[in-house]
Image (cartoon, rainbow, N blue to C red):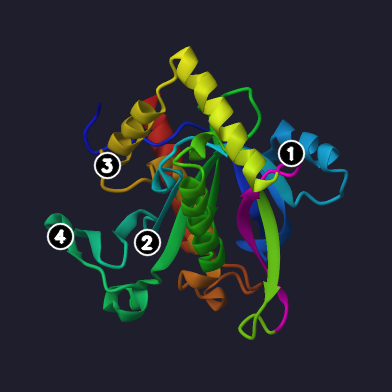
Amino acid sequence: MIKGLSITPPVIGRISIGRVVENNGRRLPEKDDQFTVTTQIQNRDGWVLHPFDEALRKASGAGKLRSIPVKVLFNEPDLNLRAEYSLFDRETGRPVCVGNGESCRRVTETGIESLPCPSPDACPLGQKGGCKPYGRLNVVIGDDDELGSFIFRTTSFNSIRTLSARLRYFHAVSGGLLATMPMELKLRGKSTTQSHRSAIYYVDLVVQSGFTLEEAIARARELDNQRKASGFDQATLDEAARLGFSNGAFEESGEDVPAVVEEFYPESEVGIDAKAGDGSGNAPASTSLKAKLDRRVAARREEGQ
């Protein structure tokens, strides 16, 4: 195993509740009120839809996709959902500081250091740099690839808090059989004074439609026994994942940087002055963070050929 490289679950697609749209020459995130399931390939129109997206919409019988039947890979809740406070460099898009509210790993002039993490509101660096909660949830859709996952990335407190609670509760009531519980991602909405009474959407994890909680637990036990009879070792799989995550200081790879930057730092937040552009309100191409990162990724690909 290469040291310093975080070994993460294989990802074959993405789940999002938003998209990136072009507005006056800028690529900005836009919220949505439904799920979208995509591949990991982008074209000029955005992320290419995964075949599951159409299949799930047909199965739901509704125009908008607001629930997705899923399983998780691991019995340990924190292996399925990794959530931390994360600060990204505004020039390179790479992680600078990742913490859990108690301790953090921070890139300094002398290397990566372990330091106290007082949370973004009480951290001078976090207040200046835009430190945010960042969660990554890996789930399995369908039966085609039992170890291939779809990743849902979010910076929503509501989604992170709800998903974390659900995973821990299902782990508890099932006797630790989280990986065999039939579940589904469900989109929920709510309004707050901060949202000016408009709806905001977040992701929940519930028992799969058609099951009561007791039936889901019984199904989890049945599937767990089948796996054990076939030689499937869930405990060793969880341990392999734990070691893989701990093998690197940060989870994101260089190839993930452009997508993470679009999600965390839309160009309107990166300090780009629209007035310094071409007079049309467009950001100057030379200072676009997205453009810089795209050029760097392209250069690395050329070097590797």
Q: Are marks 1 and 2 in contact (CB under 8 Å)?
A: no
Q: Are marks 3 and 4 in contact (CB under 8 Å)?
A: no
Residue type, label 3: Ser
Tell me the CA gap for discs 1 and 2.
Answer: 30 Å
The residue identified by callout 4 is: 109
- SS under mark 1: helix
Mark 2 or mark 4, whichever is nearer to me: 2
* Residue 47 visible in the picture: no
Tell me the CA gap for discs 2 and 4.
Answer: 19 Å
First in sequence, mark 1 or 3: give its number. Answer: 1
Q: Are marks 1 and 4 in contact (CB under 8 Å)?
A: no
- Name which quarter of the figure residue 209 lies in: top right
* Residue 111 visible in the picture: yes
Tell me the CA gap for discs 3 and 4.
Answer: 22 Å
Residue type, label 4: Glu
Tell me: 108 left or right of 51.
Answer: left
First in sequence, mark 1 or 4: give its number. Answer: 1
Tell me the CA gap for discs 1 and 3.
Answer: 33 Å
The residue identified by callout 2 is: 86
Tell me the CA gap for discs 1 and 4.
Answer: 45 Å
- Horizontal and vertical percent for residue 263? 53, 58
Magenta region, residue range:
197-211
Q: Residues within 10 Å of mark 1 (few under 14, many from 20)?
A: some
Q: Residues within 10 Å of mark 2 (few under 14, many from 20)?
A: many
- Horizontal and vertical percent for residue 133? 43, 64
Tell me the CA gap for discs 3 and 2.
Answer: 16 Å
Front in this rendered view, residue 157 or 279: 157
Residue type, label 2: Ser
First in sequence, mark 2 or 4: give its number. Answer: 2
